[in-house]
Amino acid sequence: MDASGPVEKLEILDGMPREVIRSRDQVVCYLPSIATVKIDKQGGRHPFPLILPDQLKELAESYVVRKGEVERVAGYDCQVIVLEPRDNLRYGQKLCADIATGMLLKAKTFNEKNEMLETFAFTQIKISGHIDRDKVKSRFIAKSKGWRVEDSDATEADLTQAG
């Protein structure tokens, strides 16, 4: 993060190589296997990790929220928070956040039978300290000069105008 806001880089390490770079309200996805760069604007989106509802009361209406054990993820101590759905219309969640910063480092999603459907976890992360700007630039940027560019140039819809 700098004065202009957060910058995130996600590099996919399995399967076909690709990178996603997000800065402010723009997301750029480099897809070298098809020589394509996709650009998307995401106005009004909360930056990661601010993905929880603004009012935690809304969360408690749909889930039983309980504190779990402390786990270790990517070298950091994490507090587990369990979200148990109050109905069968939602999936359960087990979230693990760094104790010092609240950064979400691991998440699991469970179905109504408590079977894991999805999981993600950091295997390596650096929290705080100086991070060189070159670390969040795409390694494909120089190669992408002749690639096809798909720019969504999305604009926010005014739903009151649309009826």
Image (tube, rainbow, N blue to C red):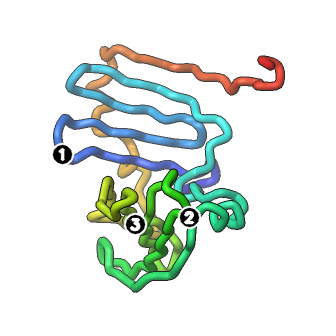
Q: Which of the two discs, 2 and 3, sits closer to the camera?
A: 2
The residue identified by callout 1 is 14
**Along the viewing direction, whichever of 45 and 147 lies nearer the viewer:** 45
Per the rendering, the mark at residue 105 is 3
Looking at marks 1 and 2 on the same chain, the residue that comes earlier in the sequence is marked by 1
* CA–CA distance in space, label 1 to label 3: 19 Å
Neighbour class for label 2 at 10 Å: few (<14), some, many (≥20)? Answer: some
Q: Are the residues flagged by discs 1 and 3 in contact, CB closer than 8 Å?
A: no
Q: Is residue 93 visible?
A: yes
Q: Residue at x 30, y 71 (%)?
A: 74
Q: Is 115 left, or right, of 93 in this rendering?
A: left
Q: Of the residues shown, which amino acid type is indicated by label 1?
A: Asp
The disc placed on residue 86 is 2
**Who is closer to the viewer here, 42 or 9?**
42
Q: Earlier in the sequence, mark 1 or mark 3?
A: 1
- Where residue 25 appears, as percent x and y from the top left, is 59, 38
Disc 1 on helix, strand or loop?
loop
Q: Is residue 123 left or right of residue 64?
A: left
Q: Secondary structure at mark 2?
A: loop
Residue 54 in which image quadrant: bottom right
- Residue shown at 39% from the left, 85% from the top: 70
**Image location of residue 60, percent across then percent down:** 64, 67
The secondary structure type at the circle numbered 3 is strand
Which residue is situated farthest in the bottom direction here?
Answer: 69
Q: Quadrant of residue 158?
A: top right
Q: Determine if residue 109 is in view.
A: no
